[in-house]
Image (cartoon, coloured by chain):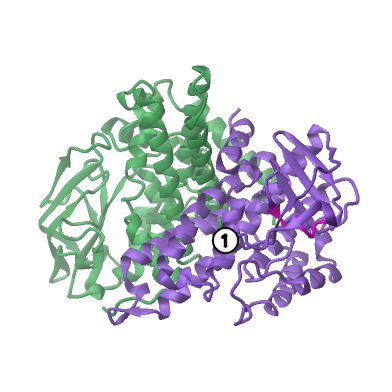
Chain colours: A purple, B green
Amino acid sequence: MDLSLNEDQLAVEGAIEKLAEQFGSSPVDFHGFALVSDDLDRELEEGGYFDIATIPEMGALSAAVSVERLARLPYTAEVALSMLVRPHLDMELPRPFGVIEQGRPGRFVATAKTLIIIDDDKVGIAHPTADQVEAIPDSLFAYPMGRLTESLEVKYLPDDVASTVKTWMRVALAAEMAGLMQAALDSIVEHVSVRKQFGRPLGVFQALRHRLAECAVLTGGVRWLALKAAWSGDAGDAALAALHAQDSATRLVYDMHQLSGAMGMTLEMDLHLWTYRMKALMSELGGRGGQAQVVAAACFE
Amino acid sequence: MNFDWNTEQKAYRESIRTFIRETLPENWEHIAHGPASREQTAFARDFCGKLSQAGLLVPHWPTEWGGRAADPWEAFILAEEMWMAGEPRGGQYMNVNWIGPILMLFGTELQKQTHILPMARGETLWCQGFSEPESGSDLASLRTRAVKDGDSYKINGQKIWTSYAGDADTCFLLARTSEGKNGISIFLVPMNTPGITVRDIPSIIGEGDIHEVFFDDVEVHEKWRLGEEGQAWEIIGQVLSLERVGIPRFSLASKTLRDTVALLKQEGRFIGAAVDQAAKAHAACEAARWYSYFIIDKRAKNIQAGPEASVGRFSTVICERLVSEFVVEHVPEAISGVHPMLLAHHQRGIVAGIASGAAEIQLNIIATQFLELPREAR
């Protein structure tokens, strides 16, 4: 047992940190939902970061640490699926990735070169042309959402490969959620530390302090379960991590908005850039009920 | 990172399991409930002696005190297996986790020679004289007073909710020698000292667990004061940090959950809401496990965990609650004694958020020290 990053993993963490610093603040004139950064995508691509999971000294764990860190940015790019799912498929697939689950709109679908199609237990791969997908510009989710405009030709995967895809999608979801939760929490800790009411910072009131502390406990737990799942690649670990992430997110999303008061309802505060990504992730892969079914099958013999 | 145990750690865990299998009696499940019952306490004295002879009582202690300087991981593996088995060490787990180590750090030669080796042999039971009727979470307000009289102290006051006091040999007692937080001192007081009266308080945790302890003109020689006068708060800070992750409660909670699910499966009742609840509880147990491991990993690398210990502790409170609620809802007959080990977990689970610092105190620590939120001036 050794829960410290090795030297190679620390080096990647440092490099990602340096890269992330350039994208740490949102533009003051941005008042939308999905703050997409093509520059972030390009820098990650040029740095070879989408392939770090395939390098033995770094592995999926390094990728998960990177996904968590990058999810804390106000900007979004298609990172998690490319870093954690794509390397575990035994085929060359162009990125960015998107997901269509049960025919519903999905993240990054309008720009994806590879779509993962989930229909009940079946998982397939499709490569849409530009006229087969369209963006949904007025979605409240803080990812660029898109949908299909027509049926695609889908290559369904064998059961074992489908299972692998879902496992790594769960790891990706949990790692991304851990970063989103941490960023939302950090943002509200800062808010209640400076915002004064009744002559005192909000953060001195115990009713709020305890809620924030509980959210910190949940966030820490999600991060460790995500890292464990990235290390093991086990279906049960991945489902546990995704379940804990989706479950904890319900609490975080509500509390963080509640604690930011009316400011959190505006698009001038960045909070929604994290919480409305969390909301998008809450339903994926069957939501909590879907993860629970996998946990029941994999963890209770 | 490596989330797996190494070969030695696996073998060590297996050796503990073998010892437990070979040493616990057939009726252990019936003894195990009521975590401080007279029957279990008596059993623990015998069990800890055997554990000591097998080198499994204090492996992480220095060799001069009966250990073999094993690393914190071995101590934690041992604690996991013991707790999972229903804690057959009884109250002696406290000796192992913190009383012995604290005496090694702050004790005089006489105190160490008198107390540490009997602990290492599994011969002695301690109780923790901390809480008072008016001083629970606000421990620094305690009023039990130790007044210097020549080379002794005369102690008067009352302690309450004291576990194991009815059978303990010695009390790790906090008493006031002057005013304020820095006016509290620690005394190592034999429980048979004249002037000490112990009364059982009936409790939902089971017989023998909670007591009132009265101190009426109890005379204690100054050689049994641990540390300097007024040093208690500094020493207690270290005690509580060891205690917060000292009990791997998630291990028994996790086992209880698995056992409960197995029962439901046998009866074809592991469906619907039970699946969702069990999965959620399992995730909470694993979150508590990995956060606790993260703290032990720090300890193993000589890094101070600080407020993260409170995060680990609160994670454990969450999982204990979810598992207890799951059992109560789906196997209610366990609470009526049909499944003794589920009852044993239930009784231990009750105190998860209260013993060794209330859960809300942990949240205060997390808010102030971990999140660094502003706090009201005191």
Task: Locate residue B355 relative to residue B175 in the image: left or right.
Answer: right
Does dot 1 land on a helix, a strand or a loop? helix
For the point 73% across and 49% down, the residue is: A99
Residue A21 shows in the view = yes
Seen in the picture, residue B334 relative to B192 is either above or below; the reply is above
For the point 71% across and 69% down, the residue is: A13
Q: Residue furthest right?
A: A92
Residue A178 versus residue A142: which sits nearer the camera? Answer: A142
Residue A166 versus residue A130: which sits nearer the camera? Answer: A130
Give, as a single range, the part of the protein colored magenta: A106-113
Tell me where residue B338 sits by quadrant: top left
Q: Give the percent coordinates (x, y) of residue B197.
A: 12, 47
Tell me where residue B153 sits by quadrant: bottom left
For the point 37% across and 41% down, the residue is: B349
Task: Locate residue A96 relative to residue B286 in the image: left or right.
Answer: right
Q: Is residue B172 magenta?
A: no
For the point 54% across and 58% down, the residue is: A220
Residue A113 shows in the view = no
Task: Locate residue B336 relative to residue B268 in the image: left or right.
Answer: left
Task: Locate residue A119 relative to residue A239 in the image: left or right.
Answer: right
Q: Give the percent coordinates (x, y) of residue B90.
A: 36, 39
Residue A16 versus residue A38: which sits nearer the camera? Answer: A38
Would you call the spot at circle 1 few (<14 residues within 10 Å), some (14-19), or many (20 or more)? some
Seen in the picture, residue A230 relative to B347 is either above or below; the reply is below
Q: Main secondary structure of the magenta part?
A: loop
Q: Give the percent coordinates (x, y) of residue B45.
A: 36, 37
Give the residue number, with chain letter if any, for mark 1.
Answer: A276
Type of the residue with mark 1:
Tyr
Q: Give the percent coordinates (x, y) of residue A81.
A: 75, 54
Seen in the picture, residue B182 relative to A210 is either above or below; the reply is below
**Circle 1 marks a residue in which chain?**
A
Residue A94 versus residue B282: which sits nearer the camera? Answer: A94
